[in-house]
Image: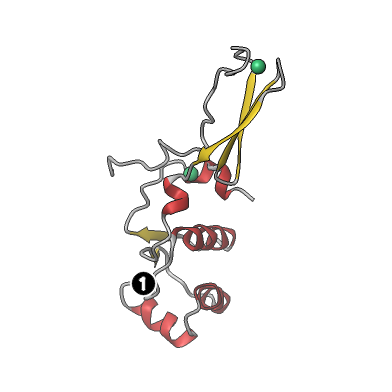
Amino acid sequence: MDNKDNCTNCKYRHTPRIICQECGSKNTISYYDGPVLIIKCKNCNWSVAGASFYSPCELDREPKYQVKIAKEITEKNDILVISRSCGINILEVKSCLEKDKVLPNKFPLDKIIKLYKTFNEMNIDIEVLPDLTYSKIGECKKWME
Ligand SMILES: [Zn+2]
Ligand SMILES: [Zn+2]
């Protein structure tokens, strides 16, 4: 297991509880509008837009993740899905499947998550290389649509 978990500090997991700077009430709501933290007081209607926050999962934009197909693929349609969703031609997909099953393309995190969902729907098991250091990415509000 990787000891670094990028989901621990994800802003989409816990929005901070903030005391109203106007009336001191704890009865505030806070939420993110994009990267900006908005705080509103239910007691006195004070509101403020805080600084910009970015979570590790939002900053992870480097195309560094690869897909490893983790099961035997025999269906033509599965090969098509892999080819289309990863942008690799069919012959190349076939030759990958005969070798180590690691697809040549490198993808950023957001694309890897989309691929994960696509393959999951098709019952194609994949592994992501290197391991994702996001234990809760499946629950992250940023990625749920
Ligand atoms: Zn996150
Ligand atoms: Zn207030």
Q: In x, y percent, where is residue 40?
A: 66, 26
Q: Which residue lies most toward the top here?
A: 24
Secondary structure beneath dot 1 equals loop
Please determine whether, in this image, residue 89 is positioned above or below residue 144.
below
Q: Camera-side residue: 85 or 29?
A: 29
Please determine whether, in this image, residue 62 is positioned above or below residue 93.
above
Please determine whether, in this image, residue 99 is positioned above or below residue 130.
below
Q: Residue at x 54, y 60 (%)?
A: 114
| Circle count | 1
Q: Is mark 1 within 8 Å of ligand 1?
A: no
Q: Residue at x 53, y 42 (%)?
A: 140
Q: Camera-side residue: 125 or 65?
A: 65
Q: Camera-side residue: 41 or 7?
A: 41
Q: Amino acid at mark 1?
A: Lys
Categorize mark 1 by other alpha carbons within 10 Å: few (<14), some (14-19), many (20+): many
Q: In x, y percent, where is residue 3?
A: 27, 40
Q: Which residue is mark 1?
A: 101
Q: In x, y percent, where is residue 137?
A: 48, 45
Q: Residue at x 59, y 59 (%)?
A: 121
